[in-house]
Image (cartoon, coloured by chain):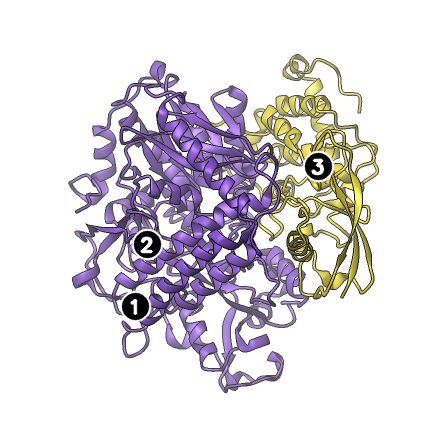
Amino acid sequence: MLDGKCPSGPLAEKWDKRCREMKLVNPANKRKYTIIVVGTGLAGASTAATLGELGYNVEAFCYQDSPRRGHSIAAQGGINAAKNYPGDGDSISRLFYDTIKGGDFRAREANVYRLAMVSNTIIDQCVAQGVPFARDYAGYLENRSFGGAQVSRTFYARGQTGQQLLLGAYAALSRQVKAGTVRLHPRTEMLDLVVVDGEAKGITVRDLVTGAMSSYAGDAVCLCTGGYANVFYLSTNAMGSNVTATYRAYKKGAFFANPCYTQIHPTCIPVSGDHQSKLTLMSESLRNDGRVWVPKEKGNRRAPHEIPESERDYFLERKYPSYGNLAPRDIASRAAKEVCDEGRGVGPGGRGVYLDFAEAIGRLGEEKIRERYGNLFDMYEKITAENAYKEPMRIYPAPHYTMGGLWVDYDLQSTIPGLFVLGEANFSDHGANRLGASALMQGLADGYFIIPYTIANYLARTQPGKVSRDHAEFRKSREEVDALTKKLLSLKGNRTVNEFHRELGKIMWEYVGMARSEEGLKEALKLIPELRAEFWENVKVPGNGAELNQQLEKACRVADFLEFGELMARDALHRNESCGGHFRVEYQMPDGEARRDDENFCYVAAWEFRGVDKEPELHKEPLVFENVPLAVRSYK
Amino acid sequence: MNLTLYVWRQKGPDEPGRLEQYEAKDISPEMSFLEMLDVVNEDLIKGGKEPIAFDHDCREGICGMCSQVINGIPHGPQEKTTVCQLHMRHFKEGDILYIEPWRARAFPVIKDLIVDRSALERIIRSGGYISVHTGGVPDANAILIPKADAETAMDASECIGCGACIAACPNGSAMLFTAAKVAHLAMLPQGRVEAAQRVCVMTEAMLKEGFGNCGNHYECQAACPKGIKVQFIAKLNREFMKAQTKDTGRRLVSEPFSG
C-alpha cells in the first residue's frame, strides 16, 4: 500500500502545517547543495529559477537550443486562478471542487486543494515578472471561461498564454544564469537516472551536438520533462516531446502512476493525410464563443452554410445544457467521436465536427472575435487554407496531455528518495481528466511555490556532495546508455525510426485511444511487443553516435515509447471502469456516459518495473475523500 | 507535385559547406514545408544517405526553433509565417527551392541547416528581465496598467526568438530582437524601474556578440513571423537616449552606443 504522506488535519490547513513541520536548509548551507533540473518548460524553468534564487547550485538541462522553447510555450488559452476578480462566485474551494470533479474523483484531495490555494499567488508572480495578461479599459485584469467551470477564472494573454508565462519563467531563469546560481545545458538530453544506495544522485546525458556521453552528480534530481502524448505518434505535443526521462527513471525504480489517463483534446485541426507529422490544437477558449455542431442527418455533404438551423445538431448544448459547449474535454471529445461514428461527421473521411462562430460574430462583430482569437484563426487558415470568420472551423479530438506520470507523494517526491517530479511529468493533481487552463497552473505551482519548500526537507537530511560522478554507478550508467546507442546504430535494418513510431501510434490510437475494450487492449499487448522486437532487429539509424544525429535522438525516444506503450495498455486493461479520459466500452451508463467503479478502483495505480518482458507489479494508493462526497460526475 | 531542392549541407562548424541537389517527389499541397523535408529525409535514409539536419520542434509556429532561409527569404515566402507553418500549397510543380541556414556572423552553423543562436540567450541574460524574486509580490491588480500599454507590451512580447530578423538584416543586426524585449518591459510599470539599466546592458551585450547595427532597412520587420514592428527599435533608441541622461546608464555602458 502506497502512502501519499498528506498531512493530517483540516484540508485548508494541511499545506501550512506541512510547511511548518518541514526542515529548512540555512542560507549559508544552500550553496553546498547541487540540484539537477531536467526540462525547462514552465515547471522546469520556474524550479531552476526559484532554487537558484534561494542560493542552491542548479544544473538545468533541456534538449532544445534554448530553455525558452519548452513545449509549455505552445499552451494557448490561459491559466486558472481562484481570484474571483469578476465576482462571479469563485473561491479556492470552488476551484478545488471543480478540479476534483473534473478529474472524475481520481486525484488526491490534499494536492488539489494546495494547487487551488497557490493559484492566486501565481498570477501575482507572473504580473510582477511582466507577463502582459489581457486587461480591461480601466487597467484591471480580464478573465474568460474554460471547460468544466461555471465561473470565469481563466487569465490569458491573447491565444499565447503559455508563451508569455514561459517567457516570464525563462526571464527569471536567465537572471539566475547571469547570477551564476544556475548552469544551463541546452541541446543536452537526459538518457538515464543514476541511483546510488537507493537515492537519486545524478543523471547521464548525451550532448546532442557532439554526441558525447557524460554524467552529472547532484544532491537531488527534479524531472520536469512533460508528458508522453507522443506515444500516439500524432499529438499536439512538440516533435521532440518524449517519455524517456520519466521512463528511464521508472526503470530505475520510480513507480509510474495511472499511465492510462490520457487526455484527448476535442478541438484540434483534423488529420489531412498520411504525411501528417503532428496535430495542432485550437484553444478550448474558442468554445466560449464557438458552437459545436454536426448535421442531424447522416452522410450530409452540403456546405455548412447550406444547412439550415433546423437541420443542425448542437450536440454539446443538447446533451449538456448547463455547461453547453464548455463541457470538459473528455466528455466533449467522446461526444464528437460518437457523432462521427454515427456517420454524421464532416470534412474528409467524416472525421470532424464544426466549431461555428457565426452566431458570436453576429452578436459581437468580427472585430471583437479577431481581438479575442485572431492568432488562432490565422493559424487555422495557415494550416487549412480556410477562413473561419466566413465558414465554421472543422475540428476533431487529438491526444494532447497526459494526466498519468511518475508517482509522487505530497512533497512531489517519487518512490526514489531525492527524485522529485513536477508538472505534467508527475501524476498528482488532475486525476483522470485535466480541466482546461490547469496545466499552466500546476506547472508553475509546483516550480515556484511547492518544490522550494519540500526539497529542503529532503536536503536537510542529506550530506551535500555525498556522491561524486566518479562513483561506480555513474560509470555503469554511462556504459549502459552507450551500449544502447551503439546497438541502435549497429542494427542497420530496413525500416526507419519514423515508420516504427507511426505504426506504434496507430496501435495506440486504435486500441488505447478514446474508446478502449478488453479485447482491443489485449490485442495491443500482443502487437506492441511484436513491433518492439522488430524494431530491435530491423531499425535503420544512419550516421554515428559522435555527432549531431537527429535520427539517433529519435530512435532512443521511440525505443522507450515501444516499452511504455505496453505499460499504458496494461494499466488501461486492469482498470475495469470508465473515468475521465479513460473510457472502457464495457463500463458505460445506458446513455453512454462513463461508469466509474468506486468500490473497486478508487485508487492510484502505481506500477513498478520488473524487467522489459516481465509484468510490472501493481501498487495501490487508496484515494480517500474526506471533504468531497464521491458523486456521479454530471455536466447535464 | 515534384520539386527540386538545393539544400545547404555542412558537416560541422569548421567544415566547408555546399548546396546539394535533391528531388522532392509526390508532395501533396496539404503538407507543411517541414513535412516535405521529412519525406525527402525518409528517402535519403532508405537510400543509405545522411538525412538533412534541421531545427524544429513545436511545428505550430510558436517555439521559434525552426530556422531556414528559402529562396533567400528567412522562413520562406509567406508573410508572418514560420517555416513549420508554411504549407506546400504555396508552391507549384517544378519549383526550384534553395534552402539555407540563417546567415549571420553571430550564428555559426552547427550542421546543415542548424545554427548556434546562443548569442540571443546572452542578450536576454544580460538584463532582459525584471529582477523580481519568487514570492512577496503585490496583488496582481494592485498596479493598474492601461489596456493600450498592456497590448503594446504584448505586441513586443510575442517575439519567438527565432532569429529571422537577424538572418534578414544586411547588417546581421539583432536590433529588432533586443528592442522587442526592451520595449515589452519598458511599457509596463513593473519594468520601468530598471528600464535605463536594461536598455544599456542589453545593447552592450548585443554589440559584444558581433551583431551589426541597425541601418533602417526594415528587412527584420518583413521577415518577422510574428509581425513585430520596427517602431520598437525607435522605442529602444528613445529608451537608450533617456538612459544616457541618467547616471545608471552611464555607469553601465563602457562605450557610448554609436548606432
Classify residue B53 as left or right of residue A45: right
> Which shade of the palette goes to chain A?
purple
Which residue in the structure is indicated by mark 3? Answer: B11
Locate residue A318, reporting x and y percent.
Answer: 40, 77
**Image quadrant occupied by the C terminus of chain A:** bottom left
Residue B53 - label? none
Chain of the residue that carries numbered disc 3 in the rendered image: B
Residue carrying label 2: A99
Q: CA distance from mark 2 to mark 3?
A: 51 Å
Which sits in the foreground, A547 or A148?
A547
Q: Is residue A414 above or below residue A235?
A: above
Give me the residue at 69% from left, 21% from top.
B204
Label 3 secondary element: loop
Q: Is residue A58 visible?
A: yes
Check disc 3: other Cα within 10 Å, few if <14, some if 14-19, many if 20+. some
Q: Residue at x 63, y 34 (%)?
A: B181
For mark 1, give the secondary structure: loop
Q: What is the chain letter for disc 1?
A: A
Q: Secondary structure at mark 2?
A: helix
Chain with yellow colouring: B
User: Which of the two discs, 1 and 3, sits closer to the camera?
Assistant: 3
x, y percent for residue A372: 57, 57
> Total label count?
3
Where is residue A229 drawn, in percent x and y? 45, 54
Badges 1 and 3: C-beta atoms under 8 Å apart?
Answer: no
